[in-house]
Image (cartoon, rainbow, N blue to C red):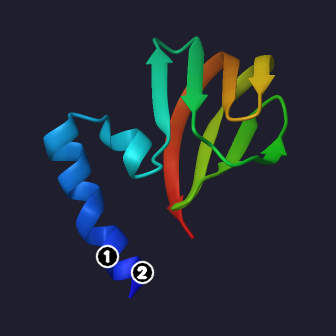
Amino acid sequence: MLKRLNQRIRPWLIRYFALPSDVILELPRITIIGQLHVYIENHQGMEAYSDTELTLRTKQGFIRITGSDFVLKMMVSEEILLEGTIKEVSFIAG
């Protein structure tokens, strides 16, 4: 019951209070600058990291970033800045 009520309230909050949907729906926000940087907000932790792959957990599944020469420039509780040559960003349901 609480889950159904929550599903009804979220769209209303987004529409009437002009709140960002990524915050209310707990979605990740991904900013990509060319093929050089990826900045990810609102993730739930790192699953895998190497110099060619980064996998992050989210509420909806996983985000997988592939490429080469990866370096984590910044990592705080829910934000990561990845630098390197970005080839692909994909979402994996889970």
- Image point (50%, 47%), residue name: 90
The residue that disc 2 covers is 2
Q: Is residue 81 above or below residue 46?
A: above
Inspect the image, locate mark 2, and give the three-letter code of the amino acid beneath it: Leu
Q: Are circles 1 and 2 on residues that touch, CB within 8 Å?
A: yes
Measured as percent of width and height from the top left, residue 13 is found at 25, 49
Q: Secondary structure at mark 1?
A: helix
Q: Residues within 10 Å of mark 1 (few under 14, many from 20)?
A: few
89 above or below 47? above
Q: Farthest residue to the right: give it.
A: 50
Q: Residue at x 68, y 49 (%)?
A: 44
- Kindly report the distance in space between the C-alpha atoms of the residues bearing marks 1 and 2: 5 Å
Determine the image quadrant of residue 18: top left
The residue to which callout 1 is attached is 5
Above or below, comparing residue 3 to residue 92 in the picture: below
Left or right of 23 on screen, residue 86: right
Frontmost residue, 26 versus 63:
26
Q: Nearer the viewer, residue 61 or 89?
A: 61
Disc 1 residue type (three-letter): Leu
